[in-house]
Image (cartoon, coloured by chain):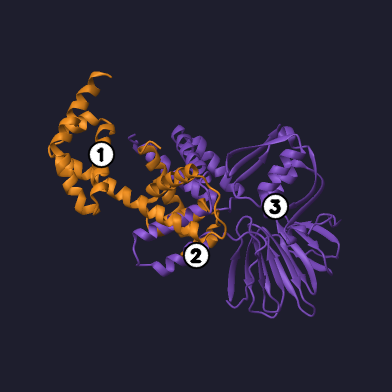
Amino acid sequence: MSTPDVALNSQVSQLYRAQSKWLHGWLTPRVNCTHLAADLVQDVFVRVMTAADAAAKLEAVREPKGYLATIARRLMIDHLRRVHLERAWLQVLAEQPEALDISAEQRLSLLQTLFELDAMLAALGANVREAFLLSQVDGMPYKRIAAQLGVSEVTVRRYIAKAAEHCMIYSLTHGQ
Amino acid sequence: MALSAEQRTALRQAAHWYSQLNSGEVQPSDHSAWQSWLNAAPANAWAWQQAERLQTRMSATPAPATSRVLSLAAHGRHATRRRVVKAGLVLLGGSALGLGSYREMQYSPLLADERSGVGEQRSLTLKNGSTLLLNSASAVDIDDTREQPHVRLRQGEIMVEVPEQQRCSVVTRHGSIAAGHSRFCVRLFDDASKLDVFGQQARVTLASGQAMEVHGGQSCQFDGKGFSAVQTLANAADAWSRGLLIVNDQRLDTFVTEVSRYRPGWLHCAPSVAGLRISGTYRLDDTEQILRALATSLPVQVQRRTRFWVTITAA
């Protein structure tokens, strides 16, 4: 392990000792579950350690509580997104006339794929994202997407371009 | 990574092309405009790589459950606001309408503009009982206000069936076709139009005033200036209207060009295999199956750069 890592480790340990109790207390009422809050605390510190330029970021932090809470908020949103996704997945499964033959491993990997896609599309407006999914996943022609969303074909073209631009930038800046 | 202003501009343009090329209505002129954009700057080529990565990622996404799950999940987040509407959309989302599920439509608007997407066929009924079947990627304007309906073919190919005692006319930029009780097909190419007559005769009139009768079982091409020699109809020339592609000893490049009409994106065949011969009956609603069949019946392989970019090369 190189020296900066050692320095980072001790920085994070210090932060953990000083703030983990507080963070757990901050999270618990927000997620309404003490176990989930404890998991999220661990996740927050993993994020702190694995962030790009982690040491520099910690160095620059003046308000450690604010920094941790920002990360925790993001993780709570991710968590909620995952919960909604799993719920939706179960609902779609229940609607299938035949049981899907899919292993637990495949299921996890599929959910992870969906989760990443969902996160990538999250910042888009509902119509833009719907149009993009209908076109790119379902292969629906623009004309039918236009009819379904009640917009013109020109608008669908704009939606797809907007979504594509966003997704390319997202992938480049999120290292995907 | 941080993106430069130049990269962002190139990405925006790539996104524009991404949208154009996915529209399913790619014209040869779009293709060449895209090609010159791509060659114009290294940043453009780089941006297009990102577009291809996105395309690859999206095409690797399992459908149809994906869009349903994601829609439902988004719906869960946005609470009950649009519950009913959204649920309807989600259900529709899973069932892409392909060939075979022709839509029937009764006409009332004064002037209509109707299109079919790539891989889609649409059937329309006019007031006098004539039916139009739009083949993949076709567009027509319809004036159904007069006693004799008037159809302008703007793009693609249509099959027209006119009932007894009725008439219908079809106009392209090369000339106009008028027929009584008959069944005929009109296809628009860049530089000419082609008429196949399956029922009783149809009359073609060019802008120059020249006119010609084309009889049942005959086929003829024309541009604004004149007619080609009348030919006997090719075997199974109307197979597409039954969702089939039937070929007998056809060159592979001709075959691939024909198949590509029914698929979004580009399907090409390398010059080294262009002259191979192919025969058979294929279903147009499953071009993937056609590609698989090619690889098993000919010494070729199907190379997929993305779902929308397929090249047939020597095996």
Tell me what residue is drawn at x 65 percent, y 57 percent: B136
Relative depth, front residue between B57 and B202: B57
Left or right of B196 in this view: A52: left
With respect to residue B222, does A56 lie above or below? above
Of the residues shown, which amino acid type is indicated by label 1?
Answer: Gln
Count of residue discs: 3
What is the chain identity of the residue bearing mark 1?
A
Quarter of the figure with the C terminus of chain A: top left
Looking at the rendered image, the disc whose residue lies closer to the viewer, 2 or 1, is 1
Callout 1 environment at 10 Å: few (<14), some (14 to 19), or many (20+)?
some
Label disc, if present, on residue B191 of the rendered structure: 3
Q: Which residue is mark 2?
A: A148
Looking at the rendered image, the disc whose residue lies closer to the viewer, 1 or 3, is 1
Counting from the top left corner in percent of width and height, residue B279 is at 81, 46
Tell me what residue is drawn at x 40 percent, y 45 percent: A116
Q: CA distance from mark 2 to mark 3?
A: 35 Å
Tell me what residue is drawn at x 45 percent, y 46 percent: B15
Q: Which quadrant of the figure has residue A63?
A: top left
Q: CA distance from mark 2 to mark 1?
A: 44 Å
